[in-house]
Amino acid sequence: MQLSMQNFSTLVEGMAASVQGAAASLLDLSVGSVLRAILEANASVALWVQWLIVQVLTTTRLATSTGSDCDSFCADFGFTRLPAVAASGLVSFSRFTPTLAAFIPLGTNVAVAANAASFIVTADTANAAFSSGLGGYSLAAGVASLTVPVTATTPGAAGNVQPAAISMITSALPGIDIVTNANMMTGGYDAESDTAFRARFGNYLASLSKATGLAIGEAITGVRQGLSYQISENINQAGTTQAGHFVVTVDDGSGVPPASLLSLVYQAVDAVRPVGSSFAVQAPVVSLANISMNIITAADVSHQIMIAQVAGAIATYIAGLGVGATLNYTRIAQLAYSVSPAVLNVESILLNGGTADLAPPLFGVVRGGTVAVA
């Protein structure tokens, strides 16, 4: 039931009309009169009671609750809000004189200008320069640069910085002169919003005691934010028919989700899968989208700034494509135009050397390769 809200003036007017309607003669309701003062006092009490009713509604109904009230309501059902996720990506350390060896320890801090967002160097055991014993990456004499992974120190969407935004080395790092990121940082998400939290709670309730696609999907999305997935039924990982088997292809936006994340997804799916079925959880097959284009911009703006913004918008869009989603060729021009009215024309657009849409293969996802804007 929708509560009909009234302000102070409306309450006083309603009371005055009721009192006058019940009286046999005209009453004095002018400003300063005793009767008006009584009505205004009653209206103040009614306004306070109305506020109390609103407070009760916001704390006892999920649809009208916000913030911690949402959390406490859903906690009774064992359902919690998804936390913020830290952005990550690659940065390149380089030096002017590579005569001597240098070392980049884990935890080295880098940042964008004015320390608006900071990142720390993390381990990559597949990198030949990494040493777990030394706890970092070694640059041998003669090696001018090295690319290593970093993760934002503060979880949230603020860590999704644009290419070339990282330029400061805020830790002591002898023998290293420059740091930069060729591609944007991705994967950063703020804590789940109230709207998304309420919507996911509805899906959670609808999936209870049901071994359905909705239940499996809810289990996957409950692992962490930013996941896209595809459930392929009665098929195995080789792409051939296998009754009673399904394949879950999941991605975190990078195209190469870590084994730890796939393990968490596997555990979540296993808790709700149909009895007697078998399944597999895997990373997607990545199709790289290499894009080139020319843009014409207004004379009163910086062409280089527009280039960076267009490239960033395209990279962000591709990073958000879900598993199985197609990258439409015509969408690229739309993304460029939507950056700013200063983008007057877009020419010579090529997607992987052609003008056709890029559809991923079975179990596939489209991710960004090179985005060359001139």
Image (cartoon, rainbow, N blue to C red):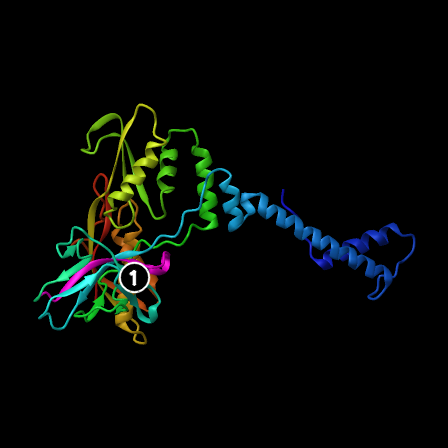
The quadrant of the rendering that contains the C terminus is bottom left
Q: Residue furthest bottom?
A: 300
**Left or right of residue 171, residue 83 in this image:** right
From the viewer's side, name the closer residue of 79 and 372: 79
The quadrant of the rendering that contains the N terminus is top right
Residue 258 horizontal/vertical position (percent): 25, 46
Q: Which residue does the image show at 15% across and 62% down from the upper left? A: 146
From the viewer's side, name the closer residue of 230 and 167: 167
Residue 30 horizontal/vertical position (percent): 84, 64
**In which image quadrant can residue 102 be found?**
bottom left
Can residue 331 be seen by looking at this rendering?
Answer: yes
> Taking 182 as reference, is 198 above or below it?
above
**Left or right of residue 309, residue 139 in this image:** left
Q: Residue furthest front?
A: 133
Q: Amino acid at mark 1?
A: Phe
> Taking 371 as reference, is 175 above or below it?
below
From the viewer's side, name the closer residue of 213 and 13: 213
Q: Which residue does the image show at 26% across and 46% down from the upper left? A: 326
Which residues fall within the magenta stretch?
143-161
Residue 159 lies within the magenta run: yes
Can residue 5 be seen by looking at this rendering?
Answer: no
Q: Residue under label 1, please give it.
A: 119
Residue 178 lies within the magenta run: no
From the viewer's side, name the closer residue of 91 and 107: 107
Q: Of helix, strand and loop, which one carries label 1?
A: strand
Residue 259 horizontal/vertical position (percent): 24, 43
**Left or right of residue 324, residue 38 in this image:** right
